[in-house]
Image (tube, grey):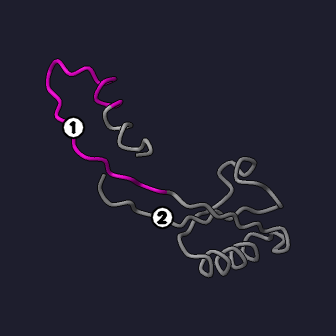
Amino acid sequence: MQQIEQHNEYIITFDNQTPDQAGPDYFTSSDYDYAKAEAYKLAHQLGRDPDKIKIFYRIAITVNTNWVEVGDDTNYEEAIQQIYDEFKPL
């Protein structure tokens, strides 16, 4: 297995909403301090209550597996299984 990449993600919502409730009414950032500052600035610009801003965090992990050779007749279920097998505990 090759390198694992970690991506920090913050999502900022208004009106005490969760990310699922926010619909298109949110923004994202990879930096907490920037997200918080922008959220307060936007709340004031849009006439929103800054006390109802919520900031949520998650980590997105990207893992690149080893390459698996494929061709015109490849059974992709087998190729995918071969890739998944890399994640099984030793």
Where is 73 relative to 67, above or below? Answer: above
In this picture, which residue range is highlighted in magenta? 61-81
Residue 41 % position (x, y): 69, 79
Q: Residue furthest left?
A: 71
Could you tell me if the residues under marks 1 and 2 are in contact, i.e. CB atoms within 8 Å? no
Quarter-of-image position of residue 46: bottom right
The amino acid on which the numbered mark 1 sits, given as a three-letter code, is Val
Task: Decide if residue 85 is on the left or right side of residue 42.
Answer: left
The residue identified by callout 2 is: 7
Residue 26 % position (x, y): 66, 59
Task: Decide if residue 10 is on the left or right side of residue 76.
Answer: right
Q: Nearer the viewer, residue 29 or 68?
A: 68
The answer to whether residue 69 is magenta is yes
Q: Residue at x 17, y 30 (%)?
A: 70
Residue 7 % position (x, y): 48, 64
Q: Residue at x 43, y 41 (%)?
A: 88
Q: Which of marks 1 and 2 is in front?
A: 1
Secondary structure, mark 1, is: loop
Q: Which of 58 and 50 is in front in this view?
A: 58
The amino acid on which the numbered mark 2 sits, given as a three-letter code, is His
Secondary structure, mark 2, is: strand
Q: Residue at x 79, y 56 (%)?
A: 17
